[in-house]
Image: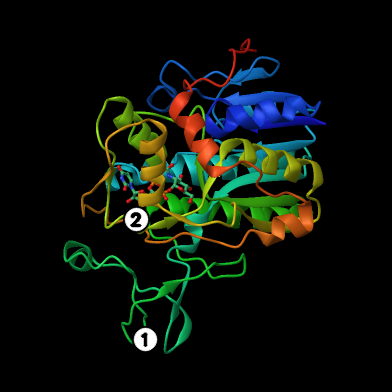
Amino acid sequence: MRVVVTGGAGFIGQHVVAETLRRGHDVLVLDSLREDVHGQHGCPPSGARLHLGDVRQTYDLDAALPGADVVVHLAAKVGLGVDVSDLPDYASNNDLGTAELLAAMARHRLNRLVLASSMVVYGEGLGRCAEHGPVRGRPRSEYDLAQGQFEPECVRCGAQLSPSLVDEEAPSDPRNAYAASKLAQEHYATSWARETGGSAALLRYHNVYGPGMPQGTPYAGVASIFTSALRDGKAPRVFEDGGQRRDFVHVRDIAAATVTAAERHTGGARAFNVGTGVPRTVGEMAASLAHALHGPTPVVTGDYRLGDVRHITANSARILDELGWMAREDFDKGMAELAGLGQTVSAPAVAAR
Ligand code: UD1
């Protein structure tokens, strides 16, 4: 199979490329190697060809796509960003980039797509109210957060909710620019699949961690931020009360899910949650990393970020049922690996242009 991986030089991309090659497929990476994202280290693994270019540029797409069987679209601006001045950059990279890619795929008669989406499309997802059963959490106001009221409340009675797992049929409710752009990508891909008869696996990744995580940028995930702090001998700074729940999934598991979807998903647009199914709190994760690095005990700061959702945990049964993928990496071993490893994945590739 010939696979084009957009964003193949990024954190997840490098692992997807390595896994695709490991399974004997041919890979071409289309990546712009943006310096604010990649610094000096944005290189795909050896064995893959690199087309240095931008998914928003027709000539780059027309150079990269011919002959492909499937496109894995990972190129995107991630994270919460800095502030609202980031909005156009999210819209440009994520919305426009996907629209240009899909139009080019139609031009080149490519009809199979795997899209990196995110759990953030659900917003707070569902919670359980003792009185009203499963309900959506009310968006958390700045006032609530400043008062230390971190748990989302029932929209009907204001009672605290216990978190529950969302499945792919839960309504979407994006709460920040990144989430809105991921949902837009899903909608573009779904519309493209309907109009062209193509297939699109919309992979809603949970919180990805592992070797090669971006460090020291506004787009670094929490596991990377904590690791950097611990390596400097500082305590991880845990926001809110540390009780936020996430599903931390190893990047090798994410890569396996992505390549499996590229190999197996056919027939229209379909969303899949991609997680371990085992929620953990950010406080637990900080403790696990501090233990692995023999570092100082994490500090719970009570700080907050307005765009953050409290809990993102979902049921990942569909991808097991339909594509036969499940997460295999052990959490504690994964954290120890993150603590102990350097940040590179493998050797640089030769650029095609
Ligand atoms: C992350 C990803 C996003 C992905 C999503 C999938 C990043 C930057 N974001 O979003 O791309 O789509 O998972 O679920 O990788 N926190 C602290 N201390 C810190 C920094 C953060 O306690 O120093 C807390 C935050 O308040 C938040 C949690 O850690 O509750 C996770 O934050 P973050 O790693 O930025 O990820 P998400 O917003 O979950």
Residue at x 32%, y 68% (from the top left corner): 151
Q: Which is nearer the eye, 345 or 12?
A: 345
Q: Which is nearer the eye, 221 or 130?
A: 130
Q: Is residue 206 visible?
A: yes
**Badge 1 local density, few (<14 within 10 Å), some, or many (20+)?**
few
- Mark 2 element type: loop
Left or right: 199, with 161 as reference point: right
Residue at x 31%, y 31% (from the top left corner): 230
Determine the image quadrant of residue 81: top left
Residue at x 44%, y 23% (from the top left corner): 38
Q: Is mark 2 within 8 Å of ligand 1?
A: yes
- Distance from disc 1 to disc 2, alpha carbons, whole Å, reads 22 Å
**Badge 2 local density, few (<14 within 10 Å), some, or many (20+)?**
some
Left or right: 46, with 227 as reference point: right
Residue 126 pos. (x, y %): 48, 72
Name the residue type under label 1: Arg
Numbered label tally: 2
Determine the image quadrant of residue 319: bottom right
Residue at x 27%, y 41% (from the top left corner): 297
- Mark 1 element type: loop
Residue 91 pos. (x, y %): 44, 46
Name the residue type under label 2: Asp
Left or right: 267, with 237 as reference point: right
Residue 5 pos. (x, y %): 65, 31
Mark 1 sits on what residue? 156
Tell me the number on the disc at residue 308: 2
> In which quadrant will I find the C terminus?
top right
Does residue 246 lie above or below 287 as drawn? below
